[in-house]
Amino acid sequence: MTLPDVDPREFERLLAALCDAELGPTEMARLNQLLRSAPEWRDRYILYMSLHATLHNTMGGGRAAGVNDGGKTGRLPRIRLKVKGERCRWTANGRRHRVGLAAAAMVLTGAMGAIAGWWWLTDRAGLDASTHGPIVARSSRSVGVRLGADGLSVGPEGSMRAGEYRLIEGIVQVTFRRGAEVLMMAPAEFNLSENRVLLRRGKLTARVPAPAKGFTVETPSATLIDLGTEFAAEVDQMANAEVHVFRGEVIVQPRSQTDVRPVRLTASSATRVDGASATPSGIDVDATRFLRRLEEPATDYSRLAAAMKPRIYLDMEPTFDGHSLFEVGSSRAIGRFTPGPGHGTSWFPGRIGSSLRLRGPGHGDYALIPFRPEMVGESMSVVAWVLAESRPRWASILKRWGRPEDNSFHFGLYLDDGDLEIHTAQADGREFIAREGRPLPTGCWQQVAFVVDRKVLRLYRNGLEVARAEHPGLRPGSLESIGVGAKLNVAGDGPDPIEPGYWDGRLDEIAIYPQALDADQIRRLYLAAGDERAPEFISDEGASPGARSTPPSGHPSHESPHITSMSPPGPVGPAAAATPAPPKSRILPPLSSNRSDEVSHEGP
């Protein structure tokens, strides 16, 4: 290969300045340009640096500064390298010594690895990164993406070149030329090439059509070869890799020094490959950890929920900026999500499609939506799906709880007991509360709802009424916002500074109705969600399985339910004593006419 038309003296001057720590940013950029332009320049660079190291060590570079060096303290000997044919001549300021080629060769051998590593790191740092490598994929959709400066960025029209990327926030959907579609979820570090991803750290899901069969995911501990399927992979800080197969088949080849046979994973199976030993271990497949598509599916549930005419309906579909909340069927943002620092991504698998994940106390994630006066006449209903990872004090689902005159509601978990509650306040000081009386289960999706009209406040979980209290009805009040996953301050523009009650878990399918839904409507919504055990496995296209004749798993047991109705301690109005239902009154759970068990309705 012919060297570019560059004066060798310029290259020599740049290398000398580098060794003397006198290379400025402009000159450093010029040196990097030359090093990238031809392998011959890189060979000369390696030779020059190896000889410089030899001379520095052999000729006393490690001695105290100022000793027999002409008074130039702190300065390394300047090396000059000139190449003429196959002969090399070098000089050092103030000295002229020849160094044995054998010594230079020894240093060269040791330096090659370090220099090559330096070159790789420099290349990674984004030196003209946008021009490196061929275009191998495109970003077909993104959600609140923020890429690190020490990696490649997305180019025009979503083009993605071969090379290293660092995803700090959000989700990017990467579509390869042969059709493989990969969701990369922050935080993640990955390298793209033709029909291949090197996942150094983070989480991805892949859908691979037949033309892209053979799509490969490299991890530090294993190589995953797809055979036309849908799967997820995750690599943690210790280089442990997990593979979860939802459809089709994946071959997992551990990266071991010994002969380790590959693992063949089929649908609904998973394995973990240890980062230290490369030993595979079978684990249960877990679809709840991996978001598999960004589009919210049209389901029987969403159609039924919309048919009941909600005033606000949030299905928690990921939005382009990662912070806006959109109503179903609308292109207008009605709310905003504010994550705490270091959130990576807050969109996770939901009860239907995707959900918003909030990380609880210590992180400060919350959202707010506007309160509209027309939401509340004297009646109101709220239906949502929630997954609690823990039960923080006063954990919030939806709360509009400000000044006493705001006629507020407080929907979430009760204090430290962690049971579902709906708590309302009237302008005259009266407060009303209905509590389930047993802690909300963690780690599984629960349908939660409350209905208030002019007579009764009702609380539901998984389609069944679990508590009630007499109630005179809500009034609009003055607070302009509703907190989602947190109680807001009295101004309604941020979390309460004393008891924000952050939610720890996921929220999905939040619907606010300006009318009182009846028990049959609540039950029908619950059944329309289908079977929670494996909703994603039922249909490859994500369609809802439809209403089922039997309740989904995880519904509350009503063999001996504890249903409470009470007013909290503290000052109350004169009519408050008459608000709770009389002790020991008897009610039957809705839609349970085929059951003989009755439920006691007791006060505290």
Image (cartoon, rainbow, N blue to C red):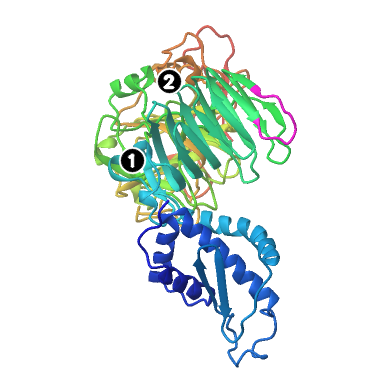
Report whether residue 409 is seen. yes
Give residue 209's mark.
Answer: 2
Amino acid tagged 2 = Pro
Q: Main SS type for the magenta part?
A: loop
The residue lying at 37 percent from left, 33 percent from top is 317
Horizontal relation, residue 259 to residue 541: left or right = right
Q: Who is closer to the viewer here, 175 or 320? A: 175
* Residue extending furthest toward the bottom: 71
Q: Position of residue 55 (x, y in %)?
A: 64, 74
SS for tag 2?
loop
Residue matched to label 1: 159
Vertically, is 542 above or below 86? above
Q: Who is closer to the viewer here, 324 or 503? A: 324
Report whether residue 566 is seen. no
- Which quadrant does the C terminus fall into? top right
The residue lying at 56 percent from left, 9 percent from top is 595
- Which of the two discs, 2 and 1, labels the residue nearer the N terminus? 1
**Magenta region includes residue 256:** yes
Horizontal relation, residue 260 to residue 228: left or right = right
